[in-house]
Amino acid sequence: MRQSSALKIGDIELGQGLILAPMAGITDLSFRRIAKSFDVDLVTSEMVSSEGLVRNKASTKMLLQSHSEEKPLAIQLFGSDPKVVAEAARIAADEGADIIDLNMGCPVPKVVRQGAGAALLRDTATVAILVDAVRQAVSIPVTVKTRSGWSQSKINVLEVARVAEDAGADAITIHPRTARQGFSGSADWSLIAKVKQAVNIPVVGNGDVTRPEDVEKMRQLTQCDGVMIGRGAMGNPWIFNQARELIKGQAVSNPTPQERLDVVRRHLALYEESLHGRQSLSGVRSRLMWYSKRLRGSARLRASLSDCRHLGDMIKFCEDFFSTL
Ligand SMILES: Cc1cc2nc3c(=O)[nH]c(=O)nc-3n(C[C@H](O)[C@H](O)[C@H](O)COP(=O)(O)O)c2cc1C
């Protein structure tokens, strides 16, 4: 068995350091509970607006709902005003967050325009003030998730990581693409290795981990302390379990069609429960589509789901699809 080093953030032991990435519209309570059932060490919420939380906006507060079985839980906040983000962190901690993660990488214009997310890569003075303010506001660990820089000519992730560490961050996650890149090109894992050399806090690597074997590959190439998976886990929560099997030197087990269908059903049930029965057709449709994405014949299923307006029919299409796999 390979001895992968354990990850510890603050006082929180996180085993092999397999982490579900924050993804807006995706890592809601239902998906986090599904990922947890496949042995992920830490789940992260969708990004939550600090302003919305402090203003007690119902739709923002809804993002803080959690369940004991998903613990430990990192709540990710975005914002740029240190007082507001610190107050939001206090609220999230009171609501049960175990870790506060600060978003310093989101390139979406609506977020960047507020000076938040990836805009902070162009304002390292505010990075320091924000981390310090949140550090003072809560007693739970504070982490930062960021990109490699604003643009190819402004790669400054080493500076951002050092500033965050000096201000009191307990760990840092690097998705090594620039804000300008969005999701184009590929993640430059060599920058994760450089950050690991530059700071003493745990470094979590992220970006383009799509197969279970990529987890160990990223660890070996970068010496990172944890590995965060986003898109590779959508409709594919087995990836966490499979990565763990590889770490233990075991063969990777693939889910049977019946096991896939059982997870789809459980995911939809948890989704319905989390929205108290008010789930949207588009929300159900997109979740069903994730689970069929990489599978043979899925284009036909996706076409049927796109045209379908009835929940019962959608589930029937899915059952038929999985039964013929
Ligand atoms: C649909 C979607 C939503 C995302 N939302 C967030 C978010 O709320 N906060 C964040 O820090 N990153 C967000 N990300 C970025 C991911 O956390 C991750 O850094 C990125 O997808 C690269 O990792 P991957 O290659 O494993 O997907 C999002 C990504 C996707 C695809």
Image (cartoon, grey):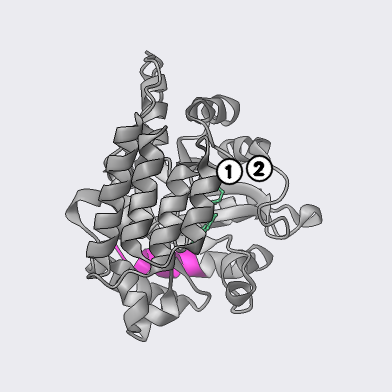
Q: How far from the left and from the top, in percent, is residue 128?
A: 54, 64
Q: Which residues are magenta?
A: 130-141
Query: Dot 1: few (<14), some (14–19), or many (≥20) neighbours within 10 Å?
Result: many
As drawn, the label of residue 187 is 2
Residue 13 in sight in this render: no
Is the CB–ligand 1 distance for label 2 below 8 Å?
Answer: yes
Rendered view: 148 above or below 204: below
Q: Position of residue 238 (x, y in %)?
A: 38, 35
Cβ atoms at labels 2 and 1 below 8 Å apart: yes
User: Residue 130 versus residue 307: which sits nearer the camera?
Assistant: 307
Q: Which picture quadrant has residue 269?
A: bottom left
Q: Amino acid at mark 2?
A: Ala
Left or right: 179 as drawn, with respect to 199:
right
In the image, residue 16 sits, relative to residue 37, either above or below, namely: above
Is 14 in the magenta? no
Viewer-proximal residue, 79 or 308?
Answer: 308
Q: What residue is disc 1 on?
A: 207
Badge 1 element: loop
Instruction: Assign the N terminus to one quadrant of the image.
Output: top left
Numbered marks: total: 2
Position of the C terminus, as image quadrant, is top left
| Res 260 → quadrant | top left
Q: Does residue 129 sit above or below 157 in this rendering?
A: below
Vertical comparison of 200 with 255: above or below: below
Disc 1 within 8 angstroms of ligand 1 (CB): yes
User: In the depicted view, which residue is nearer to us: 260 or 111?
Assistant: 260
The residue under the point 42% across, 34% down is 239
Q: Position of residue 73 (x, y in %)?
A: 30, 54
Q: Magenta span: helix, strand or loop, mainly?
A: helix
